[in-house]
Amino acid sequence: MNQDDVTGQGRESNSNSQGNRGDRAGSSSNGHDPGDAARDSPRWCREILTAETPPDSTDRAFVVGLLVRLVAGEALPDLGSQLLLRDLYRRHVEKGARAVPDLDVWDAGKDTDPIPPREWLLGTVACRAFLTAIFGAGGAGKTSLLILFALSMATGAVLSHERPYGRSRVLLLSFEDGKDELRRRVRAAMMRYGIKPGDVAGHLFLASVQNPALKLATMDEKTRSAAAGELVGAVERAIQRHQPDAIMFDPFVKTHRVPENDNNAIDFVASQLAGLAVEHNIATVVAHHVRKGGDRAGDADAGRGGGALKDAARLVRTAMPMADKEAEAYGIPLDEACQIFRCDGAKANITRLGGPDWYRTVGVELGNATDAYPEGDNVGVVETWEPPATMAGITPGITNKILDEIDAAPPEARFSTHPKATARAAHPIVQRNIPDCDAKRAKAILAAWLKSGLLYEREYQDTEQRKTRKGLFVDAAKRPRTLAEMIEDEDPG
């Protein structure tokens, strides 16, 4: 795949320029040489008559008559007839040589051969011949997640929420981190999971791409359209040398030099990635930043710039930090929640949407202290995380239903978590709304909500008992929102 093959622009300009030369010098634009009229007119006639797209009856009669006279040894016809013959040659012989191949059409009723399964490499994240895009907020953990996925594929070990289908060779291209920083991040992840260098030798290849000339696409200043960059050839040479099963590009914005909001240009870049996947039967995975306000988990339109990347990718995931309200619902302190993120399916043309899968970032001491830097480096590594079992399966809808009941208590008889509360006890409300929830778990859920501030206690006047008590109240600002509510907020029309 050379640059002209990728862009199509080189072919067009070459064809036009060669065609002009053919008009002046009698040469063809595609390798067919009309040559000298006196010498080659009989050949032209025969090739026109046997062309894949033959002339109509009038032109055919002209060509047949001319060929008969030429074979009989008569002189060349007048100039007008010569020009007509040349035009017919170009229209029927040259154009026929460039004819589009037939469509590969088959009869579905006779298609009884076994169908091979899709060649998944990792869960429903990476698949041969397909492009995957992961849209993530800044600092959410996109790069660390890619490294985790790469190590899982390279070792065949289950390190993430996705299961590897055997071992794969992976090429990870970082366009943001320098060589040493990429080494730190990969080494820290290997240390966290007890992976030795020999475990990934020949299966995990890394490159820090900092050369500004190495881009998938740039803008042609003359045509103002996208053109293939030098990175395409460099990646193909790396494919030939290392034979990867998957290639990861991080981040997308650094892989090209075209306007982010130019959908045609972004489509060209995305087509390069998808083309590599199809042409070499590999999985291509790209990490991409989200637009401003694009922080909704599972939103396929969260990606920054033109939407063509989402359209070209057959698999789209989002990596979003745990929202404050999610942390409150799970009873997770905010200083811990900022290290946790969720990965959701946003678009899945070839499989079912998945998620949320939860991950968190933990620090790993690299052990690279020196006299100048006695503390060495602490590097963030991603690991799987599960919400507290107490909160498992509690959706925003269920949470709000429980809160509604608690909040509906009259002002003189609020619900309570006090151990001696009976009629005013709040935990039976939780039990009614969560299947198979015992009293112990229900009380733990209320305790988590009190810890997060979703519920709070306040004194009120019990008019029946004529005493001051403490009861439960709901902080409406901390209620979790359902997906429908979030969509309505963004698009009130």
Image (cartoon, rainbow, N blue to C red):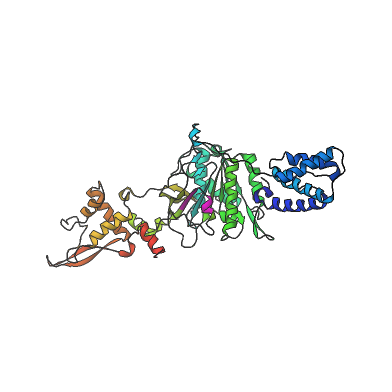
Q: Is residue 448 left or right of residue 297?
A: left
- Is residue 381 shown to the viewer in this render? yes
Q: Residue 377 or 486: which is nearer the viewer?
A: 486
In the picture, which quadrant includes the C terminus? bottom left
Residue shown at 81% from the left, 51% from the top:
80
- How many marks the image carries: the answer is 0
Q: Residue at x 58, y 50 (%)?
A: 271
Percent from the top left, x then y, of residue 366?
52, 48
Up the image or down, 444 lies above or below 413; here it is above
* Residue located at (67% from left, 59% from top): 223
Q: Give the range drawn in magenta.
A: 309-318
Image vertical order of residue 393 relative to residue 224, above or below: above
Give residue 333's quadrant in the image: bottom left
Q: Which of 456 and 39 is in front in this view?
A: 39
When the figure is inspected, residue 352 is found, relative to residue 220, above or below; the finding is above
Residue 68 in percent (x, y) is at 81, 39
Q: In this view, does 353 lie to the left or right of 42?
A: left
- Asked if residue 365 can be seen in this view, the reply is no
Q: Where is residue 364 in the image (x, y as percent from the top left)?
A: 48, 49
316 part of magenta stretch? yes
In which quadrant will I find the N terminus?
Answer: top right
Residue 329: where, in percent of width, then height? 33, 56
